[in-house]
Image (cartoon, helix red, strand yellow):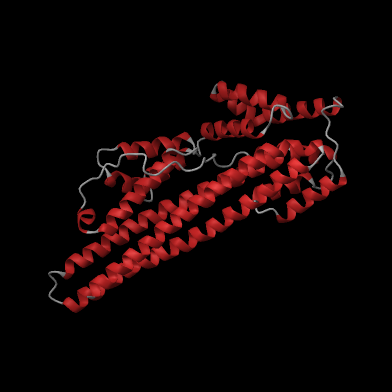
Amino acid sequence: MSALVAGVLAGGGVLLPAAPARAYTAVRAADPADASSPVAAAAADEARARVLRLAKSGLPAEIRTSAWNALRSTRGDAAIAEWLAPGGGYDAAKQRLRDARSRNRAFCERVVSTHPVAFSPQVRSAAERALKGTDADRAAFVKTGYAEAQQADRVLREADAQRRLEVAEKDRAFVRVVAESDPGEQVRVAAQWALRAGSTDADVAEFFGYGWATGAALDVEAYRLRVADGEVRRQHVLSSLIAQAVAAEEALKSSADAAKARAEAESAWRAVADHADGAQTAWLAEQEAARAQAESWQNIARLSKESADAIWEKIAAPAEARQGDWAAEQAEAARTAAFWKDMADRARDSENRVKG
């Protein structure tokens, strides 16, 4: 399983549940749009809250540090807007994640978080040493050290009758179900690898020992990074659309062609409402995806507790952790969907106000 795990572990970083959005004192910069529109002020508050959640998350240090720098800027909301903009601080931080040193460190961190000492003592020890070592140490672990330590663990398990896990046909059958229908893509990949042509009971045992946990962690990470990417883009577009709507409404006050100016202002506010509607729909879908994952992991946690087979013991703790992760994501998606509904309602109120 080493080739598969080495590949999938090189994915994105771990994100922890979002921190309370209002725990940071906002620095508001003078902005004409803020002064003239409660809608703009609400959008700016949410943008800052979003950056705060990213700063307090378990994202890689490159993103967290960049987010904190934006939050602490004396330029207030202008700095937040620039950080969220395409090519801004968020994108620059993500680009730095592609650096080989960052990828190697992330790989080592993932190995430590997904390989329990009781099942993979050699791998876990080697990964921890690499993390404490130099960039060269981590590069060596990624290139050859992980596979070597993994093979050493397999030899030890096979030689130790007490540590060798018995794989029953019902366990293999369950992995087949996971491979076909689990809601997590990376979990399905890990299960399919365990059942690949030529696989043995040792491969299935390793799926229960660390492959399942690895896939589960990667699925959470991928979800969190994906929704962060999407929301950063939506927040940038929202601020731009609101600025246009505020400007159009302000122009209405002095326009020589009132009918044309009114139509432009109405259209601008309608564009804000349409954008917010789309964002709400997207977040409701994310909420449902997180709900399905939380329910799945709740069931797995229950099965692990009910099973008398030793092979199920290794997935018990990861299952409970993932259920908590996805429940938190479900709640965060619901909160964000509610924000976008409120934003759509505010935009429609503004459109109606312009109509008079």
Q: Nearer the viewer, residue 112 or 36?
A: 36
Q: Position of residue 93 (x, y in %)?
A: 43, 40
Q: Position of residue 7 (x, y in %)?
A: 65, 41
Q: Nearer the viewer, residue 276 or 333?
A: 333
Q: Please count the marks in the image.
A: 0
Q: Nearer the viewer, residue 267 or 2?
A: 267
Quarter holding the N terminus is top right
Residue 214 visible in the shown view = no
Q: Is residue 199 left or right of residue 189?
A: right
Q: Residue at x 33, y 54 (%)?
A: 43
Q: Residue at x 79, y 42 (%)?
A: 307
Q: Residue at x 44, y 41 (%)?
A: 19
Query: Which image quarter: residue 69?
Result: top left
Identify whether 150 is placed above or below 25.
above
Q: Position of residue 344 (x, y in %)?
A: 37, 64
Identify whether 136 is placed above or below 295.
above
Identify whether 218 is placed above or below 182.
above
Quarter holding the C terminus is bottom left
Q: Name the residue furthest bottom.
A: 259
Query: Which image quarter: residue 262?
Result: bottom left
Residue 129 visible in the shown view = yes
Q: Position of residue 232 (x, y in %)?
A: 41, 51
Q: Is residue 125 left or right of residue 335?
A: right
Identify whether 199 is placed above or below 239.
above
